[in-house]
Image: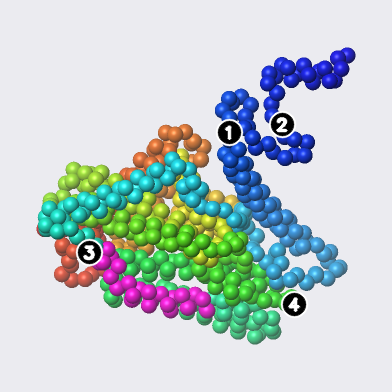
Amino acid sequence: MEPRAAQLRRREGLGGEKEDRPSREGKPHFGNAKCPGNNETHSGPDLLQWTRHMQAVKTQLLEQAQGQLTELLDQAMCEAIQAYPPQDRPVPSIPPDSLCKTREPSLGKRKVFINRKSLLDELMEVKHFRTIYHMFVAGLCVFIISTLAIDFIDEGRLMLEFDLLIFSFGQLPLALVTWVPMFLSTLLLPYQALRLWARPQSRAAWMLGVGLGCMLLAGHTAVLSILPIHVAVEYQLPPASSCVLVFEQVRLLMKSYSFLRETVPGTLRARGGEGIRAPSFSSYLYFLFCPTLIYRETYPRTPNVRWNYVAKNFAQALGCVLYACFILGRLCVPVFANMSREPFSTRALVLSIMHATLPGIFMLLLIFFAFLHCWLNAFAEMLRFGDRMFYRDWWNSTSFSNYYRTWNVVVHDWLYSYVYQDGLWLLGGRARGAAMLGVFLVSAVVHEYIFCFVLGFFYPVMLLLFLFIGGPLNFMMHDRHTGPAWNVLMWTMLFLGQGIQVSLYCQEWYARRHCPLPQTTFWGLVTPRSWSCHT
């Protein structure tokens, strides 16, 4: 038998140069490190920076795994508590913040919040990705230079005109004043209704409280449903001001529903116990401002606020608004302003759609970056909200089902939790296709309502695209398609879809101004004017 020491020496000899190993104390060696199979040496600071990065990645993965494991253990403990006592033993009192108070039985996973950065913030740390961002900034500079050059040539002066921006945000103070009663009704009425239902009292008194709580919720729904529509129609709010109202209307309705959906079932189950209480008012107030539509009493928080990061995101959001105005003013208005004055032809329609694909995809990217990244991250930073996953890498999607899940995670979480999962629960865990169709129907109707509210007319382009193109594509382009060709196909469909929307909505906008109705009728309001207006 060959001695053990000789065997070790022979193996080291076969391996060539002896590889560096950590010391016996376990301390890493930060000299000129050399990786096996790589002749490139790395300096000490570079290796130290890489080690710190890997430690941060490890910490993030451990936190995520811990959050998911905690959720599974909470669910198991909840089920054990519910099934605990035999029939001959009393049921133990469960505190109001018990694990079992969270939800009714669901058929899917529950949203778990953890501390994590937005994906673009992580990508911006890569030099090559920052260059793409710089290219978009350079494009904004080109638009500004072209505007100045054209004004100088035509008018003999250097002056930036913001007529489109000023028109779009006209009557903004009125929209902000209208927001105040909308917010107050959401802040006070649902919370007071929950307190009435959570109060332990006799059955007759409790039934009276239930009736009063339902009246409060009916008043809350009426304020959010009627007030913004009345103001927008009565005062003819322009698009951007209408956008503020309708976004807040939909956001507050979704938040109040989430609050009641997460708290009412547990409150009703535990009503006969002792120590029942509604969630704290401060947690509800925080939820109304934090960038999520799923209510929890607590969220992961960051240790401090980086005000320079807040200012940077607000500045970038403002830059995106200016960028969008330049795109509409230079690429859309000159093409569509007089299109309704020309005779209709299929060739002109197809060319207008092809022309609108580029500004359309620019508008999509600007909306994504301005709202889903800059705006939400600014509020998350001010509120120290830790979970910044407002979107995923939707640009890498090879299927429309993945694109719908990753484009807007904030809204997707709400639809998944309260439309898809609750729909499956109502259907007894069957008919997943019907539950998914319900999600598409709700999303399509709300998107079309937003477009109708902002533009001031009914033209169901978004509704038809959602139901008759987006829905089938969700089932045909599924997650089993993973090749790069499918990503190219997805982007091609996005380009064409945005071109169709920009072209048809712009044509309808100018047709309604060039061909006003002599008499207001219902069919005149819902019939597209661009089909018949050729003055």
- Depth check, front residue: 144 or 352: 144
Q: Which mark is residue 21?
A: 2
Indicate which disc, 3 or 2, sits on the residue closer to the N terminus. Answer: 2
Given residues 198 and 382, the one toward you in this image is 382
Label 4 amino acid? Answer: Glu
Give the alpha-carbon distance from disc 3 to disc 2, as whole Å.
68 Å
Residue located 70% across and 57% down the image: 75
Which residue: 37% across, 63% down?
A: 449
Image quadrant holding the C terminus, namely bottom left
Residue 506, compared with residue 40, is above or below; it is: below
Amino acid type of the residue tagged 1 in the rendering: His
278 inside magenta stretch: no
Judge whether residue 180 is colored magenta.
yes
Dot in front, 4 or 3: 3
For marks 4 and 2, the one nearer the N-term is 2
Q: Which mark is residue 400?
A: none
Tell me which numbered mark, 1 or 3, is placed earlier along the sequence. Answer: 1
Q: CA distance from mark 1 to mark 3?
A: 56 Å
Image quarter of the N terminus: top right
